[in-house]
Amino acid sequence: MMNTLKGKIAVVTGASSGIGLATAKEFAFQGAYVALAARNVEKLADIVSSLNKQYGPMANGKEAFIAVATDVTKEDDCRNLIAKTVEHFGRIDILVNNAGISMRAMFKDLDLSVIRRLMDTNFWGTVYCTKFALPYLLEARGSVVGVISIAGFKGLPARTGYSSSKFAIYGFLDTLRVEHLHDGLHVMVFAPGFTTSNIRMTALVANGSEQGKTPREEGKMMSAEAVAHRMAVGIMKRKAQVILTPVGKATVLLNKICPRLLDKLEYNYMKKEPDSPLK
């Protein structure tokens, strides 16, 4: 168990908004130094500037926070992210694979390119970043985190691509943990429930365009800040798995003891969403 994140070097993908941004800020509050990665370069630069002003430089005079423009669907971008982080900080202690997109459409209506985009971002982004960071994480006996979802434990109707990508991340990281059982590598699968973020705004619909609005009451969900704090605690305790929210925990439990009942409950719950594709 780690008592603090103070002085740790972290990489956070998808850090320009939502859980990723909240995580970068939580790590900064805990005393860690962070490489923030996302596609939105201008927004990242503003965030990093603000963090550096708030927390000041490292003891060696270098900036404590850096921005690295990264499209995690591109292998070379992920390689560059890790290289830039090591070049600036000298090592990596924590990798948070958070970058992700969602979708909402029935599979029968779905353009297959939507599933490819979700797998490229959610799954392959996690694989690429983990591959290039792994030598440094092993050297530091550090932590690799995959932000999945309750949809990575139980298929979510009208989210075939999303659930598939999150199940894939779970399988990848679960296997990685076993492979490095005696290397000191900490692997954590982190599964928030519904969280306040913009992921539903940018979710893809059947033809691949963005949904543009959220079908849920964002104010009633767990905040991204609360999620980020729980992630930091999970890393410090070196937990293998963290499942958040009462609904999320109940879903995982019910899926083990009465999966067919859960199918019905889940279908009825999700079809209540405004404009739900479920009938």
Image (cartoon, grey):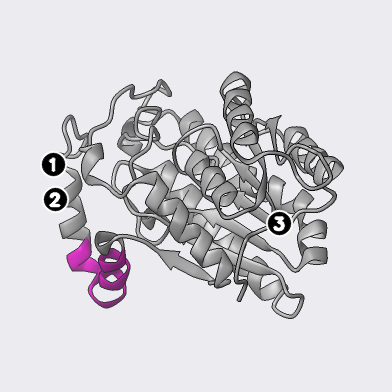
Q: Which residues are magenta?
A: 249-262
On the question of residue 72 being in view, the answer is no
Q: Tell me the number on the disc at residue 268.
A: 2
What residue occupies the far bottom of the structure in this picture? 182
User: Which residue is rendered at x = 53% and y = 43% of the image?
Assistant: 25
**Is residue 240 rendered to the left or right of residue 150?**
right
Given contact means CB atoms under 8 Å apart, are the residues at marks 2 and 3 in contact? no
**Would you say the residues marked 1 and 3 are in contact, meaning their CB atoms lie under 8 Å apart?**
no
Please give the residue where the numbered disc 3 appears in the rendered image: 7
Q: For the residue labelled by badge 1, is the local secondary structure a helix, a strand or a loop?
A: loop
Residue 6 covered by magenta stretch: no
Kind of residue at badge 3: Gly
Q: Most prominent secondary structure in the magenta stretch?
A: helix
State if disc 2 and disc 1 touch (CB < 8 Å).
yes
Q: How many marks?
A: 3
Distance from Cα at disc 1 to Cα at disc 2: 7 Å
Query: Of label 2 and label 3, which has the lower sequence position?
Result: 3
Which of discs 2 and 3 lies nearer the camera? The answer is: 3
Residue name at image x 76 percent, y 60 percent: 137
On screen, residue 115 versus residue 91, left or right, reads: left
Distance between the alpha carbons at the discs numbered 1 and 3 = 46 Å
Query: Which amino acid, mark 1?
Result: Lys
The residue lying toward the viewer, choosing from 25 and 255, is 25
Nearer to us in this view, 61 or 248: 61
